[in-house]
């Protein structure tokens, strides 16, 4: 029997209200994966400690890319480290965001040499750039506030999300077809 | 042992009191967290934040476009174009790329006329990697956003 793909085609009151809830949930609980490479990592740790508490924004640091929505790249990215940054970014599930912290991730900083990648946006797409050397913890928090505003302006396609959920719910008891040689 | 001692020993009350002494002492102190968008810390006197160009008492620009700050900058984020000669020269173009800038303060130290200063504005996060402040923005300076609630 043919499998029907569910989906809400046009916008309605139901989908826009669900959109508001989804956007609010996404922006209030941003879980970053700390990718602290060098000095900016210290300021990131200071932002997470008790004087400037990141937990007030709903931000909890997760060490694994599989369960995080944001990747804070903090520190100079060298050519040796660049494939690792890309690999970890690929392991994050959608919706995912990247925050480039510090001058070195925006443009290589003062290190215009043969071994430093001049800006991490050459390998992964970056949403918010926070300049500074190192940026103050409040500056990083302002970067998170800008990211929250960006998430607020997005359009999560709730019709497609619901459709994918309902389709996978229908398939929950399916088994793989048996191939006999 | 009195009845009171017997009961408190059964429920481990002296041990709980010994273990939670530090926690309860911290509960009764003032919290040290700075609630960032609503409260901000006082800026220290030599804090290196964003830039500002200065005018002198009559409102004339002090900067004469000598280019020393652009040469000193380790990241090459300042662009200065000089117009005129000698004492009457001014900088017709003065741009600083603030996302590339590393806020090291070398341009302020190098300026021979002390016309560039660093303010205490630190909220420079942007969506785009190349944000350039031109002359008018530098003469005006920036103020921090006000967050309600």
Image (tube, rainbow, N blue to C red):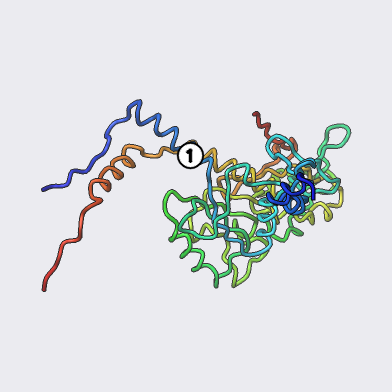
Query: Residue A97, can we see it?
Result: yes
Give the camera-side residue of A109 and A156.
A156
Front residue of A164/B133: it is: A164
Give A117 or B52, whichever is nearer the viewer.
A117
Q: Which residue lies furthest to the top in this view?
A: A13
Residue at x-position 80% and y-position 42%: B29
x and y, in percent, of residue B48 in the image: 78, 49
Picture quadrant where residue B19 is located: bottom right
Please identify the quadrant where the C terminus of chain B is shown.
top right
> Which residue position holds label 1?
A25
Q: What is the crowding at mark 1: few (fewer than 14 residues within 10 Å), some, or many (at least 20)?
A: few
| Quadrant housing residue B140 | top right
Chain bearing mark 1: A
Tag count in the figure? 1
Q: Nearer the viewer, residue A86 or B56?
A: A86
Q: Classify mark 1: helix, strand or loop.
A: helix
**Which residue sits furthest right?**
B57
Query: Which residue is at a point 53% across and 46% down the rendered structure image?
Result: A30
Residue at point 65% right, 29% down?
B148
A1 is higher (above) or lower (below) than B61:
below
Residue A72 image offset from top left, x and y in percent: 57, 55
Horizontal relation, residue A14 to residue A121: left or right: left
Q: In this view, does A4 lie to the left or right of B114?
A: left
In this orientation, does residue A136 appear? no
Where in the figure is residue B93, as x and y percent of width and height?
69, 45
Q: What percent of the width, then of the height, locates residue A94?
A: 42, 51
């Amino acid at each position: 029997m043919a499998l029907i793909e569910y989906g809400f085609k046009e916008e309605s009151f139901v989908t826009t209200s669900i959109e508001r809830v989804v956007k609010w949930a996404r922006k209030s609980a941003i879980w970053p994966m700390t990718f602290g490479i060098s000095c900016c990592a210290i300021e990131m740790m200071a932002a997470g400690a008790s004087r400037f508490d990141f937990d007030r924004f709903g931000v909890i640091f997760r060490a694994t890319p599989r369960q995080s929505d944001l990747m804070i790249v903090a520190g100079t990215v060298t050519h040796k480290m660049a494939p690792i940054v890309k690999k970890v970014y690929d392991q994050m599930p959608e919706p995912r965001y990247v925050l480039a912290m510090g001058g070195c991730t925006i443009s290589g900083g003062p290190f215009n040499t043969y071994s430093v990648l001049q800006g991490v946006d050459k390998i992964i797409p970056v949403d918010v750039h926070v300049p500074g050397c190192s940026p103050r913890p409040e500056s990083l928090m302002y970067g998170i506030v800008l990211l929250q505003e960006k998430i607020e302006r997005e359009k999560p396609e709730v019709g497609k999300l619901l459709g994918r959920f309902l389709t996978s719910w229908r398939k929950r008891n399916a088994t793989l077809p048996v191939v006999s040689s | 042992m009195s009845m009171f001692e017997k009961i408190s020993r059964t429920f481990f009350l002296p041990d709980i009191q010994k273990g939670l002494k530090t926690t309860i002492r911290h509960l009764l102190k003032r919290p040290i967290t700075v609630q960032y968008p609503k409260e901000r810390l006082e800026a220290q006197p030599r804090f290196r934040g964003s830039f500002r160009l200065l005018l002198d008492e009559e409102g004339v620009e002090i900067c004469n476009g000598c280019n020393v700050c652009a040469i000193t900058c380790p990241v090459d984020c300042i662009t200065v174009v000089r117009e005129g000669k000698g004492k009457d020269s001014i900088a017709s173009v003065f741009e600083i790329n603030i996302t590339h800038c590393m806020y090291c303060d070398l341009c302020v130290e190098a300026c021979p006329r002390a016309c560039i200063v660093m303010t205490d504005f630190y909220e420079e996060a942007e969506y785009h990697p190349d944000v350039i402040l031109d002359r008018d923005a530098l003469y005006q300076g920036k103020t921090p956003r006000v967050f309600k609630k």
